[in-house]
Structure formats: C-alpha cells, structure tokens
Image (cartoon, rainbow, N blue to C red):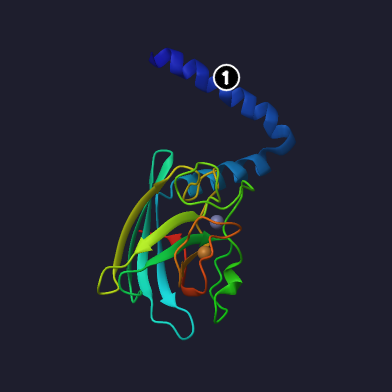
Amino acid sequence: MKFHHLLIHSSAAAALLIAGSFSSHAADAHASHSSAWAAVKKAVAVLHPTQGNKTHGKITFTQEGDTVKIVAHVEGLIPGQKHAFHIHQFGDCSAADATSVGGHYNPDNHAHGLPEPAARHAGDLGNLQANDKGVAHYEVTITNASIAGLKNPIVGRGVIVHAKPDDGGQPVGNAGARIACGVIGVAQ
Ligand SMILES: [Cu+2]
Ligand SMILES: [Zn+2]
C-alpha cells in the first residue's frame, strides 16, 4: 500500500516538474486559493433593518457534504405573518431600501420558485413564519449552492427579509419591500 502510494506521488511530482517549466507559479497560486476557500464550512449573516423598519436577526450557514444547512433567527417581524427570505446577488446593504443587493442570486439562470422545485434561483429560501411575538425560527437545507465551493458559492452575497410572503410567483415571488439586509461572511 505504502509503496503504491509513493509511486503515484512520484509520478505526480514528475508531471508537476514538467508542467512547472511552463506555468508553475500560476498553477500553484490557483491551487492554494481554491483549497483555502474549500476549507470554509461555516458562514454567518447578521440582519439589520432597512430604513424605517425594525427587523433584525442572525443567519448561520453550515456546509454538510454537498448541501448547505441554513438556520435563521429573526425578530421584529409582523406577528403571525410569513416573510419572504432570499439570498440576493450582491453583499451590499448600503442603500436605505437595500436595492443595492441586486436581484435574487440566480447563477443557473432558472425561474423563481419556493424551495421545493430543484430548478429555481439558488437564492430562493422560501418564507420565515413569524410567531405571535414577531419572532421566526427557520431551518432549510439547500442542495443547489455551497458556502465557498465551486458550486454556486454564497459567501459575500446578501440576505434579505421581505415585508410580504413569497408566493412563488414570477419573477420574484411578489414579496414586497426589503425590510432587513445582511451580508454572508466567513464564520469561526
Ligand atoms: Cu428577496
Ligand atoms: Zn427568486
């Protein structure tokens, strides 16, 4: 076993040496960049209210194999109401109404949908359900994105909670105003 492994290793090293005479520097830089991002398994977004609103919260993202588990705790919602919940294209909450995050994160160019159909925007996370105190706890696992891998990476993008429910309609679920905004960052 050990001898076999060494054989593979030395032939790979020989291949690297040959490739090295052409572009070793660029290839090494690319490999180390990719593996550093692949090692990121947890992310977090802190939601702050947009102008005139009071919704706030925290979202955690955990890479579990090929899926991402998302856990949201959000407060300051309308009691008893559903609120649309999406990942948007840009990690920029600077606009007072959060239009600066752009549209739904949609790297596969699909139509909008609730989390059930596989073919939907990667950022379509469904709805938060507020309790009678305006607090929502929501968990969803998605298969069409990764935290910082090769498949539709979400780190650095925006998270939005909307004033109204996402009804799954086109083009963006009739979800209304953006009442809270956060940016997905690398977590400890
Ligand atoms: Cu949205
Ligand atoms: Zn969408």
- Helix or strand or loop: what does disc 1 sit on? helix
Q: Quadrant of the C terminus?
A: bottom left
- Residue 1 percent location from the top left of the image: 38, 13
- Residue 20 percent location from the top left of the image: 68, 33
Query: Which residue sits at x=61%, y=58%?
Result: 171
The quadrant holding residue 4 is top left
The quadrant holding residue 172 is bottom right
Question: Mark 1 near ligand 2 (CB under 8 Å)?
Answer: no
Q: Which residue is the extreme one toward the left?
A: 132
The quadrant holding residue 97 is bottom right
**Residue nearest the viewer, comparing 37 with 74:** 74
- Residue 65 percent location from the top left of the image: 39, 38
Q: Which residue is the extreme one toward the right?
A: 22
Give neighbour class at mark 1: few <14, some 14-19, many 20+ (Cα, 10 Å).
Answer: few
Query: Which residue sits at x=63%, y=24%?
Result: 15
Answer yes or no: is residue 20 visible: yes
**Residue nearest the viewer, comparing 66 with 78:** 78
Disc 1 residue type (three-letter): Ser
Pointer 1: what residue? Answer: 11
Answer yes or no: is residue 156 visible: no
**Residue nearest the viewer, comparing 166 with 60:** 166
Q: Does residue 101 lie above or below 23 as drawn?
A: below
* 129 relative position to 154: left or right: left
* 119 relative position to 59: left or right: right
